[in-house]
Image (cartoon, grey):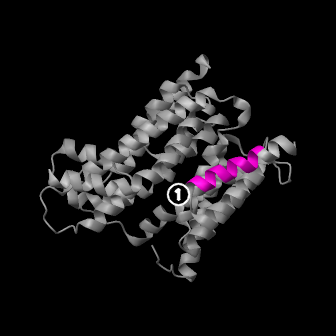
Amino acid sequence: MAGESWYGWLLVAGASLVVFFTRAAFILPGSRLRLPPTAERILRYAPAAALMAIIAPDVATAHGALAISLDNPRLIGGLVAFAIAAATRSVTLTIVGGMAALTLVRLFLT
Amino acid sequence: MPMLREGLLAATSLLLGMIPFGIVAGVAMVSAGLTQAQAVAMGVLVFAGSAQLAVVPLFIAKAPLWVMYATALVVNLRYLIYSAVLAPYFGHLPRTWRALLSYITVDGMFALFVGRFAVDEHKRHRHWYYFGGSLLLWLGWQISSWVGIFVGALIPKSWSLEFASTVSLIAILMPLFYDRAVVAGALAAGGVALLAARWPLNLGLLAAVAVGVAAGLAVSRFAPPARKA
């Protein structure tokens, strides 16, 4: 763990700079520039695409290979979470339901 | 300061929704292998739930640093929009204030503020409203993260609690699905990410975002977005 600690610190340092940049880009220089509509659209689509691009492999692959089966706890947990989020929009229920499904599959099917 | 108080009171409505994210972010960060000090620093310095949660699966997979930086950037691109909208509100303030208000910006307070004040309406102390509400949310985020960091360190690794970050990303993603173009873009990105899961350096992630944005733009061209939110 100690040997990797620079990796964690560099993550914290870089991510904080990058995130501060997105917040300060217009406020700090006091810019009155308006974003063109296409740019605004790209800025809207990219985050949803990135979130899905992180979620999908984390849920549906194992060791780089597709893992679409009932005994993949992450797949079931993820699907249950999607269903609860779509039905209720409740953050707490989504987290609790997804984690409960993951745990049940992990304990009883694997 | 009546403005500071008004902002604080307005933000209490957002506090409850933020607490589960803070706890999960704390738990997930330490379960992923960040030290408690790193996790606390991340909450204070990055102070962005979606970015903090999004880098967790990448950190576990030992992704290169630049991939994690790029991910934090893309997930937070919405802040560029907020920044552009807020700039004229805060343009008259000194630099230190503008830096502070930038750092403390979060989705909910942005929405409350822009809904409460018009740009050309010259209320001199409106930044105190923004600061008061944001400060409350900042404190709520830090404290709920610390609870998660403390609890996360006590729970055995075998519980796979780091998966809570992925589940929270699902909860963050769902409200973004307000029009067909966003959904199409996300589905395309998810498909590419699966197909490219074996690509080196997580290049699949970047390819997925590029394809997802292209798909979103294509759909918005043929089926104009129906604005709801």
Tell me what residue is drawn at x 54 percent, y 47 percent. Answer: B71
On the question of residue B109 being in view, the answer is: yes
Q: Where is residue B180 in the image (x, y as percent from the top left)?
A: 58, 75
Residue in front for this viewpoint, B5 or B216: B5
Tell me what residue is drawn at x 13 percent, y 65 percent. Answer: B122
Q: Position of residue A5 (x, y in %)?
A: 55, 22
Residue in front for this viewpoint, A26 or B28: B28
Q: In this view, does B57 lie above or below B37?
A: below
Residue in front for this viewpoint, A97 or A32: A97
Which chain is home to disc 1? A
Number of numbered discs on residues: 1
On the question of residue A54 being in view, the answer is: no
Region of the chain picked out in magenta, as a range:
A92-103
Position of residue B176 in the picture relative to residue B166 (left or right):
left
Question: Could you classify mark 1 by the number of other residues whose Cα lies within 10 Å: few (under 14), some (14-19), or many (20 or more)?
Answer: many
Q: In this view, does A103 lie above or below B125?
A: above
Instruction: Specify the quadrant that holds the C terminus of chain B.
Output: bottom left
Tell me what residue is drawn at x 86 percent, y 53 percent. Answer: A70
Under tag 1, what secondary structure?
helix
Kindly report the secondary structure that dominates the magenta region of the rendered protein: helix
Position of residue B148 in the picture relative to residue B86 (left or right):
right
User: Disc 1 marks which residue?
Assistant: A47
